[in-house]
């Protein structure tokens, strides 16, 4: 309102045509009132009297923008100078087509005929079903246009935010297929349509020629919006394990929508809107009860939900108390739905986003636990299979030497000692059987140490040719070995470990070579990688034949024809993995009639350094 005009309240002039109506409310400019201040059948009680300044172009604005029927009665001429009073009537409201309004702003605006120094009196008569608040202001034409532009800006700001939230909700529904996101999308879309009706955009751009349809759509959207919000909050409460009976109470309100739509269609919009206001108050209080039953473990989400419910409850009280005669109305009462809808849209999106994040986190934790459980199960099954294979191998491989020892012991018990040569042969077989069993058990122990991570590596400069000579000395028939290598070759190795690897390779060659055949060896650099030493051992396979290259280095693998000789099937497996552990490798290839094994070893290793065992679990 401009600084110049003066506003006062006085009894209604009985000569004004508005005084002969039995309904309505006359308000002083720039003052907000509740429609409950006037009971049906009472005459008009307030009048706006304005003394304009030098600026003659004044505009009266009536808000909010969803009133049904507004009639402004303006007194013509100077009220103090003329005894004969003449009145001019202007009509606006939802029931009047937008094109037929006195002015084309979003709010209801009326031109006032005034001149400098003139005392202007006008009356406002109102009939409405879809609001409980009223505000009348008088301002200059420039200020009215600025207010209209500001209303467009606010509408664009609100619409842009809600549209983004609708799109995001739709995307989240497409990703998660969760029902709450789809319901949130529908609710925000209905809120957007309702806000367009509240701001006057629907009447201006969608139904400018049909005021009746505009009024009908506004009432339908108000009812529909309440029930969509009610259903949404019902399912939101159940998602947090809220009270089941609160959910069913909310569900029981859904059929009321059918009666409200019927009432609006048959001209009983006032009853439908009054019921809607009562249901809004009831469900908001119901939400406070439901909130007490929520089970939310996340602290941030729990306090966010409580803040959202409590804020909406306090806001409702702030809006409702002036309607009950307690407190004064403010500018917020003119845009009540807009603010609470925007706040609710943002808070609901935050709540659902946080809820999704927690669901995703819990799902990932559950999947991690499932993977751990599955891995432990696989390890347990593997351990059981290995244990079963180990016991089968051990029983099978110890059967022959135990049978030899048992036979020799039986002969001694029965006194069949035989000649001295026969006795030596029996003792030699017993010794070989014992050594075979000892070799099987020793390799099992070494493999177990490797896989349990108990084998620690400590490299030191060592003459590997001396280690190889010690391995050859343990062979019963060293004459079958032939090869070449340097006299002395110092490499960084773990001496006992390296001897174990060479002994296993040599035992394998001796065990599976054809009788009276030569075993060749060669020490040198790897042609493919000169930074590695290569020990090559070749033999001609005997009765067992050539090994299966795909299974050669697997645990407990032995050729079918090799089970007559005591063995564990762990020798090559042990050498292969020990070589890999020391940054080397063991390779196999077939060269004509020869089975060739190549042990590769790096020339340079950090000495006096403890190497971690990657097989340790």
Image (cartoon, rainbow, N blue to C red):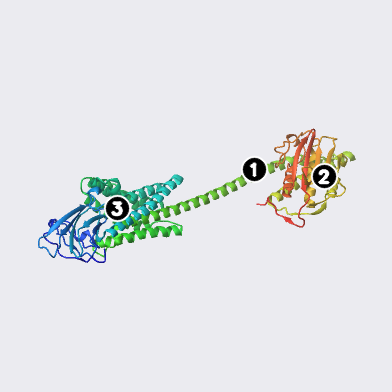
Which disc, if any, is residue 524?
A: 2
Residue 595 versus residue 421: which sits nearer the camera? 595
Quarter of the figure with residue 302 = bottom left
Element under label 2?
Answer: strand
- In percent of width and height, residue 455 lies at 72, 52
Sequence-first tag of 3 and 1: 3
Q: Are marks 3 and 2 in contact (CB under 8 Å)?
A: no
Residue 238 versus residue 485: which sits nearer the camera? 485
Sequence-first tag of 3 and 2: 3
For discs 3 and 2, the disc positioned in front in the rendered view:
3
Q: Name the residue under label 1.
A: 385
Residue at coordinates 24% horizontally, 55% vertically from top-left?
109
Q: Is residue 105 visible?
A: yes
- In percent of width and height, residue 355 lies at 44, 53
Above or below, 234 against 27 in this view is above
Q: Are marks 3 and 1 in contact (CB under 8 Å)?
A: no
């Amino acid at each position: 309102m401009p600084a110049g005009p003066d506003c006062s309240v006085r009894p209604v002039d009985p000569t004004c045509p508005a005084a002969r109506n039995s309904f309505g409310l006359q308000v002083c400019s720039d003052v907000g009132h509740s429609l409950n201040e006037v009971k049906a059948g009472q005459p008009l009680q307030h009048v706006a009297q304005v003394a304009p300044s030098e600026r003659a172009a004044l505009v009266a604005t009536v808000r909010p923008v969803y009133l049904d029927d507004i009639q402004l009665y303006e007194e013509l001429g100077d009220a103090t100078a003329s005894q004969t009073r003449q009145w001019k009537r202007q009509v606006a409201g939802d029931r009047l087509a937008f094109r037929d309004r006195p002015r084309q702003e979003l709010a209801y605006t009326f031109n006032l005929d005034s001149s400098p120094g003139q005392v202007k009196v006008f009356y406002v008569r109102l009939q409405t079903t879809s609001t409980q608040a009223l505000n009348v202001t008088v301002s200059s034409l420039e200020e009215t246009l600025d207010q209209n532009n500001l209303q467009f800006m606010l509408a664009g700001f609100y619409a842009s935010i809600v549209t983004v939230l609708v799109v995001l909700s739709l995307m989240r529904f497409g990703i998660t297929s969760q029902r709450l996101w789809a319901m949130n999308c529908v609710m925000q879309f209905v809120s957007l349509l309702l806000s367009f009706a509240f701001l006057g955009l629907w009447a201006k751009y969608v139904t400018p020629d049909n005021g009746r349809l505009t009024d009908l759509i506004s009432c339908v959207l108000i009812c529909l919006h309440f029930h969509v919000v009610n259903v949404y909050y019902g399912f939101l409460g159940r998602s947090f394990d809220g009270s089941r009976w609160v959910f069913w109470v909310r569900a029981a309100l859904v059929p009321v929508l059918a009666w409200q739509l019927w009432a609006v269609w048959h001209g009983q919009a006032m009853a439908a809107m009054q019921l809607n206001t009562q249901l809004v108050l009831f469900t908001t209080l119901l939400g406070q009860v439901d909130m007490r039953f929520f089970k939310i473990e996340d602290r941030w989400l729990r306090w966010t939900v409580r803040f959202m419910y409590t804020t909406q409850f306090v806001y409702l009280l702030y809006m409702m108390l002036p309607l009950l005669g307690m407190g004064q109305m403010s500018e917020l009462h003119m845009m009540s739905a807009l603010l609470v809808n925007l706040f609710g849209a943002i808070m609901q999106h935050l709540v659902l986003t946080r809820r999704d994040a927690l669901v995703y986190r819990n799902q990932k934790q559950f999947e991690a636990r499932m993977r751990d459980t599955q891995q432990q199960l696989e390890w347990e099954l593997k351990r059981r299979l290995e244990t079963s294979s180990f016991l089968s191998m051990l029983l099978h491989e110890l059967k022959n030497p135990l049978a030899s020892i048992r036979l020799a012991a039986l002969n001694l018990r029965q006194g069949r000692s035989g000649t001295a040569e026969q006795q030596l042969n029996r003792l030699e077989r017993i010794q070989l059987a014992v050594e075979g069993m000892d070799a099987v058990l020793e390799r099992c122990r070494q493999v177990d140490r490797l896989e349990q991570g108990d084998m620690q590596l400590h490299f030191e400069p060592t003459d590997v040719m001396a280690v190889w000579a010690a391995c050859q000395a343990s062979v019963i028939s060293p004459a079958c070995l032939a090869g070449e290598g340097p006299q002395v070759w110092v490499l960084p190795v773990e001496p006992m470990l390296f001897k174990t690897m060479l002994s296993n390779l040599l035992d394998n060659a001796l065990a599976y070579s054809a009788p009276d055949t030569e075993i060749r060896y060669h020490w040198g650099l790897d042609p493919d990688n000169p930074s590695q030493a290569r020990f090559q051992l070749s033999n001609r396979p005997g009765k067992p034949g050539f090994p299966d290259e795909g299974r050669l280095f697997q645990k407990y693998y032995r050729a079918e024809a090799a089970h007559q000789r005591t063995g564990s099937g762990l020798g090559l497996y042990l050498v292969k993995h020990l070589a890999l552990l020391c940054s080397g490798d063991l390779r196999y290839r077939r060269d004509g009639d020869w089975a060739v094994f190549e042990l590769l070893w790096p020339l340079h290793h950090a000495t006096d350094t403890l190497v971690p065992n990657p097989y340790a679990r």
